[in-house]
Image: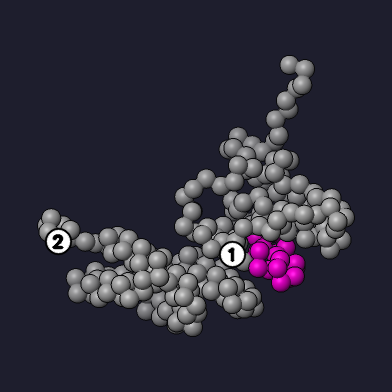
Amino acid sequence: MDKCGLTPDEISFNTLLNGFYNNGCCDDAEKVWEMMKERNVEPGTKSYNAKLRGLVSRGSIEDAIGLIERMQKDGPKPDTVSYNELIRGYCNEGRLDEAKKVYDDLVKNECAPNRGTFHTLVPRLLEAGELDSALRCCDEILSRKCKVQCSLLQGVVTALVAASRVEEAKRIVELGRKNFYPRKGLRMPPCTREDMGLKMPPTGEDIDAEAETDWEDSAPDEEGCEEKDVSKNA
């Protein structure tokens, strides 16, 4: 860019930061930070989110916590993606109590949890048997009309049925169908443990990176979520 007479801006540097951190090249990423400082380019929230992602990916959760605290104090203010990275770090270490606290901080600081938040947290809650917490997340998903993959809610519904909490499972299915998912998507599973072989819902590690992509085909179009009636005797 310099040879062409172009001046790199924050977006240019963020592209480099994401590339280096996503590929584990933290030393190269630190050089980019130095370049930004030399050129008086002020790093924004996305710059710090790239660094958070790098810290979490290499297991430096304490450093990630310190970075979030610095952002809260001096700016730029952390956003949903910032908190998602910290939630991911705690979940990776099995520290679900801390992950849930970060979720509470996210909401308290007026950031809206997104599909990345829930796809990170809910599967880990189910794995740990924290069904009540997973159910509360489902209620948040539905009340906020957050477009998560249908399989995420299906995992909670299946776990509820396995725990003989059938009425709660029915409530999630009914609300889910009403909001987003047609009958062919979200459904009640068989009510016996032997017949339940559904896979766990996907985790949220890559959900934020896919935020602009279309979500699961089982979601209805904007015209509604009623299943079409196809007559066999056309």
Q: Residue 207, image x and y in percent?
A: 52, 58
Left or right: residue 144 compared with residue 188: left
Count of marks overlaid on the render: 2
Q: What residue is drawn where x is 31% and y is 64%?
A: 16
Please, is residue 30 above or below residue 9 in the view? below
Can you say which quadrant of the picture contains the C terminus?
A: top right
* Helix, strand or loop status at disc 1: helix
Return the residue nearer the eye: 121 or 59: 59
Q: Residue 89, image x and y in percent?
A: 53, 74
Q: What residue is drawn where x is 40% and y is 70%?
A: 24
Q: What residue is drawn where x is 56% and y is 47%?
A: 215
* Helix, strand or loop status at disc 2: loop
- The type of residue carrying mark 2 is Asp
Label ID, residue 217: none
Task: Give neighbour class at mark 1: few <14, some 14-19, many 20+ (Cα, 10 Å).
Answer: many
Dominant SS type (magenta)? helix
Which corner quadrant of the image does residue 133 belong to?
bottom right
Q: Is residue 57 magenta?
A: no
Residue linked to disc 2: 2
Return the residue nearer the eye: 205 or 148: 205
Please, is residue 31 above or below residue 18 in the view? below
Q: Is residue 77 visible?
A: no
Residue linked to disc 1: 120
- The type of residue carrying mark 1 is Thr
Q: Which residue lies most toward the top here?
A: 234
Q: Residue 67, image x and y in percent?
A: 42, 79
Can you say which quadrant of the picture contains the N terminus?
A: bottom left
Q: What residue is drawn where x is 77% and y is 60%?
A: 159
Q: Tell me the magenta residue range.
A: 122-140
Q: Is residue 137 magenta?
A: yes
Left or right: residue 206 compared with residue 161: left
